[in-house]
Amino acid sequence: MDDYREWAAEPALRGVVSCAWTRTTGSPRTYRIVPDGCVDVIFDGVDLQVAGPDTGPVLVRAEAGALVGVRFPPGLAPAVLGLPASELRDQRPRLAEVGPVSARLTEELARALGAGRAGAGSADASQSRAGVVHRQGKTASGALTSTDRLEPGGAPAEISNLPEISDLLEGSDLAKSSDLAGAGGRRPEWAAAVVLQRAVLARFRPERRDPALPAILAGLRAGTGIAELAWDLGIGERALHRRCRAAFGYGPKTAQRVLRFHRAVALARAGHPFARAAAETGYADQAHLARDVRALAGVPLRALLSGTA
């Protein structure tokens, strides 16, 4: 049994969190992780880890049990974690190494998952992260199984005009619920995902966001040249490089390449012919896309989509 689900972010966190996700498996498995520009915070049943932005493929061995995660869209993790994304690039540190973590949080997460899963859901503490196959909302057989999942390849959350903390808390389901383990009769992984999102809300500081981030992201996604983008923003190329490293963990050229790759894979996964996916995302041709996929994913595009590699 292998079940991966993505849950829409709680109302108070939409725009800060792309999604929450849960994965349960009945036997150990190895997953291929590929760059997407995102950062995840993950609870493996015992401890919390951070999966920083990757620059290449990573093979992760996960033991049987449950994982619960929260995914930040590109550029938003520093506003929650309080440090530049470049310090997390290609890293999987414990959350306690990034900032203070209360023992109560891990206890509440374990309680939400249930006593039977709390000790059995431990994945490799240094390399826990959901695999790319599961980000498409598929089971091991490849079939879609839940209407609770986000649409495959969904657009990243918008990051402009985010509310202040007081506005986020007011009327929030996260602020109201004190017994989340049984909330609404939902499955325990969902309850743990809500607990984890509540912890994210408590750490979010809007003032840590780079005010130029929406414009930088828009330019990178549009394929704007680095010199032109810096000119449009009224800053130098070195300043743009510093801001991209802080927000995404990469310089602007690498960030642009990762975002383009992720979008092309999402289109191909949605059924677009490979040539069309390449053209719509700014690749010179299908061969250019194929080279980038091999470099960033370590396997051909068809193998990546099928989850066989």
Image (cartoon, rainbow, N blue to C red):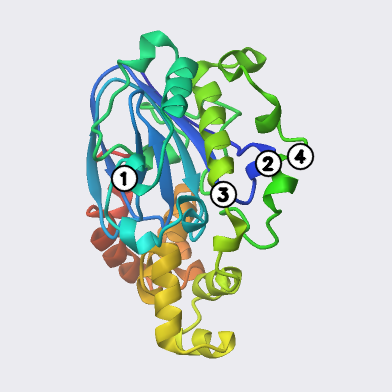
Q: Distance between the residues labelled 1 and 4?
A: 31 Å
Image coordinates of residue 205 in percent, x first then y, are 58, 54
Near-viewer residue (213 or 198)? 198
The answer to whether one can see residue 275 in this image is no
- Disc number for residue 12: 2
In this figure, which residue is indicated by the disc labeled 1?
A: 97
Near-viewer residue (151 or 229)? 229
Residue 96 lies, with reference to residue 247, above or below; the image says above
What amino acid type should be assigned to the residue bearing mark 4? Glu
Residue drawn at 42 percent across, 67 percent down: 246
What amino acid type should be assigned to the residue bearing mark 1? Glu
1 or 4: tag closer to the N-terminus: 1
The total of numbered circles placed on residues is 4
Front disc: 2 or 1: 1
- Disc number for residue 204: 3
Residue drawn at 46 percent across, 62 percent down: 277
Question: Element type at marker 2?
Answer: helix
2 or 4: tag closer to the N-terminus: 2
Furthest residue to the right? 171
Image coordinates of residue 87 in percent, x first then y, are 32, 60
In this figure, which residue is indicated by the disc labeled 4?
A: 170
3 or 1: tag closer to the N-terminus: 1
Image coordinates of residue 51 in percent, x first then y, are 34, 46
What amino acid type should be assigned to the residue bearing mark 2? Ala
Q: Residues within 10 Å of mark 4 (few under 14, many from 20)?
A: few
Q: How crowded is mark 2: few (under 14 residues within 10 Å), some or many (20 or more)?
A: many
